[in-house]
Image (cartoon, helix red, strand yellow):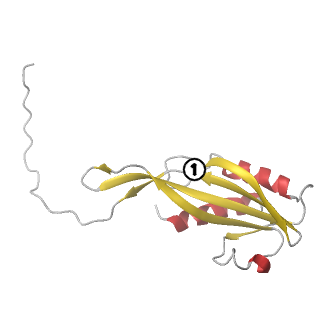
Amino acid sequence: MNTKPIIDAVIARLQQYLPARRIASCPENILIGPDYLTPGDVLVGYRGSEFSAPEDVDSPVQTQRPQLMVAVLLPELDGEDGVLATLDTIRQALGGYRLSDCHRGIRLVRDRYVGYTGGRWHYAIDCTTETLFIEDREQADGPLLTTVNYEEKDA
């Protein structure tokens, strides 16, 4: 499965649970200029993938474990609209949620305090799911199967 549909599906899921929040894909320049973000942002980002050893069945197949991060940037820590309540809602929205083309639901890995800057609390939830990566390659044409013979051998 490709990465962008996973991020888009997580954003759509969070928008259902947090309709009053601005939920977006993590911007490319977040590390060099997060000041343009509005308080109340929930950002979804891709942190990379882990892959299993290939299972060669004519076209290599690998289990892919995409790692996602959901960042919460809010001015309030406590309260109904604070970071802690928002983190609780995100955990409930994502924990076990099965994305299309993924054969496991989302697993929560950890959440953590990132910092406090510009009047905003920064927290992040790391999560993962599993899907298959199948190598895209041309298959060599071989002879077509036209007859099947069943032979039993005595043991």
x 75%, y 76%: residue: 34
**Depicted 49 relative to depicted 27: above or below:** above
Q: Is residue 84 left or right of residue 93?
A: right
The answer to whether residue 14 is left or right of residue 153 is: right
The x and y percentages for residue 95 are 66, 47
Number of numbered discs overlaid on the protein picture: 1
Instruction: Please provide percent x and percent y for residue 103.
Output: 49, 48
List x then y, in percent, for residue 74: 84, 65
Q: Residue furthest right?
A: 79
Seen as rendered, the residue at the extreme top is 155
Residue on which the image places disc 1: 98
Frontmost residue, 122 versus 60: 122
Of helix, strand and loop, which one carries label 1? loop
| Mark 1 surroundings: few (<14), some (14-19) or many (≥20) residues within 10 A | some
Say which residue appears at 66% left-offset and 75% top-offset: 27
Amino acid identity at mark 1: Arg
**For residue 145, side relative to residue 74 (left or right):** left
**35 w.r.t. 88: above or below:** below
Looking at the image, which residue is at 63% across and 77% down?
28
The answer to which of 93 and 45 lies nearer the viewer is 45
- 140 over 107 or under it: above or below: below
| Residue drawn 9% across the image and 19% down it | 155
| Location of residue 141 in the rendering, given as x and y in whole percent from the top left corner | 14, 62
